Amino acid sequence: MDYANLPTPATAVADFCLIPIGTPTASVSAEVAAVQRLMKASGLSYTMHSAGTTVEGSWDEVFRIIGQAHTLVHKNGVLRVQTDIRAGTRTDKKQHFAEKVSKVEAILAADVSTKAEGAAGGSHIDAEGNEGYIAGDAKVGEPAAKAGTAKASESESEGSSPGGTQVGPGKVKGNWASLLKK
């Protein structure tokens, strides 16, 4: 095998989080904005999210733009830059990164419609951002585990409510972790 001439993959998707180190303040929004301007000018397909940027193109284009982002941030006065990169390739088919998200969203939408059939329950997110599904036949004031909206573990005593107490249609007050178990 001629390793020196082994080509890079035709396409790649990379998710990267560029971390400027030693900025005058804790905020790095100016550096992130500079990188996003670079991404837009590149012509590559990309999306920014709260913890980085996902970019798609040829392997060489993707890794060149990440290197250019480093150079840009250095030119803006940051002496040290660290980047976490997660990259993926596939050879069996072409699939845009947005298609991957759409596929999972479709699966989740099917879950909600399946659970909603014949029930007035639904999904609920508590103040801490934990999500759980509450069966429509649960009665207000009834322990959620008894209502079938949560599963008690073997270590919990009888009468305890690992899933909290049903406080209304689609709402449980209590421990959400047990609601996430199927």
Image (cartoon, grey):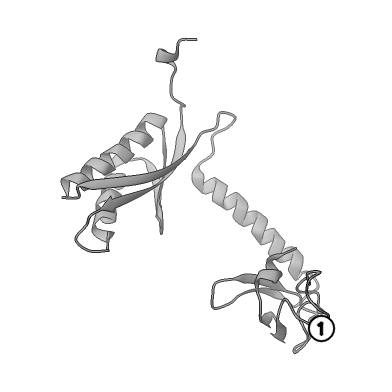
Between residue 134 and residue 21, name the one nearer to us.
Answer: 21
Vertical side of 49 occupied by 79: above or below: above
Say left or right for 149 vs 93.
right
The quadrant of the image that shows the C terminus is bottom right
Vertical side of 172 occupied by 85: above or below: above
Residue at 29% from the left image edge and 54% from the top image edge: 32
Residue 109: name its quadrant: bottom right
Q: Is residue 168 visible?
A: no
Residue 41 rendering spot, x and y as whole percentages: 27, 44
Query: On the image, numbered disc 1 is attached to which residue?
Result: 159
Residue 125 rendering spot, x and y as whole percentages: 59, 74
Say left or right for 102 vs 54.
right
Mark 1: give few (<14), some (14-19) or many (20+) Cα within 10 Å.
few
Between residue 157 and residue 62, name the one nearer to us.
Answer: 157
Between residue 168 and residue 172, name the one nearer to us.
Answer: 172
**Count the marks: how many?**
1
Between residue 127 and residue 97, name the one nearer to us.
Answer: 127
- Which kind of residue does numbered mark 1 sit on? Gly
Look at the numbered disc 1 and give the secondary structure of its residue: loop
Residue at 75% from the left image edge and 89% from the top image edge: 141
Q: Residue furthest top?
A: 1
Vertical side of 15 occupied by 22: above or below: below
Residue 23 rendering spot, x and y as whole percentages: 22, 57
Residue at 27% from the left image edge and 63% from the top image edge: 27
Say left or right for 2 vs 141.
left
